[in-house]
Image (spheres, rainbow, N blue to C red):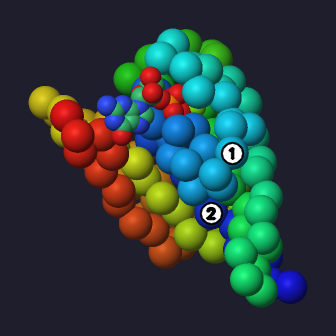
């Protein structure tokens, strides 16, 4: 069975965990409206036809915050980019995309295929 690893990146609260919940049709991922509900990256696996899909849910990476916890969370999330098959950058309609543009530099550097998805289209 082929294993496919999907790394989900994005700001806190854009709906990364909700998306994984929806796609895996369960409620195993932690969802909340609090910032940094997922402090450490979390792995979820499910089978789809002949594939074993693994989602890597990451905490929102605080690029603007210069504190140690933010830096540790960012490097912890990005280290998964070395062995994933696809990076999904999740975003939402907002005033500024500085955060995403910053993250795109790391995504380009990883040389992995990626897609940018826009969530909360109901808003
Ligand atoms: N309106 C709206 N709210 C959403 C959507 N997806 C997630 N949310 C809400 O956004 C908040 C943060 O979701 P969460 O999955 O914890 O975000 P994460 O920090 O990126 O993992 C929760 O209150 C969700 O219910 C969506 O498509 N539309
Ligand atoms: Mg989350």
Name the mark on residue 6. 2
Local packing at callout 2 (Cα closer than 10 Å; few below 14, some 14-19, many 20+) is many
Query: CA gap, disc 2 to disc 1?
Result: 17 Å
Nearer to me, 70 or 122: 122
Respond yes or no on whether mark 1 lies under 8 Å from ligand 1: no
Q: In the picture, which quadrant includes the C terminus?
A: top left
Whole-percent x and y of residue 10?
Answer: 45, 41
Q: List the residue tagged with mark 1.
A: 26
- Which residue corresponds to the image point at 30% horizontal and 51% vertical from the top-left? 118
Whole-percent x and y of residue 31?
Answer: 59, 27
Q: Are marks 2 and 1 in contact (CB under 8 Å)?
A: no
- Which quarter of the rendered image does ligand 1 occupy? top left
Q: Residue 109 vs residue 118: left or right?
A: right
Nearer to me, 30 or 66: 30
Q: Quadrant of residue 38?
A: top right
Is residue 1 visible in the rendered image? The answer is yes
């Amino acid at each position: 069975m082929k294993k496919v690893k999907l790394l989900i990146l994005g700001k806190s609260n854009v709906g990364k965990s909700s998306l994984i919940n929806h796609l895996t049709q369960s409620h195993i991922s932690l969802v909340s409206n609090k910032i940094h509900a997922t402090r450490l990256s979390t792995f979820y696996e499910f089978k789809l036809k002949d594939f074993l899909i693994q989602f890597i849910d990451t905490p929102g990476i605080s690029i603007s915050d210069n504190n140690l916890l933010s830096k540790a969370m960012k490097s912890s999330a990005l280290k998964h980019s070395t062995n994933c098959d696809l990076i999904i950058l999740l975003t939402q309609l907002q005033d500024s995309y500085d955060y995403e543009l910053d993250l795109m530099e790391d995504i380009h550097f990883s040389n992995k295929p990626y897609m940018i998805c826009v969530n909360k289209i109901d808003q």
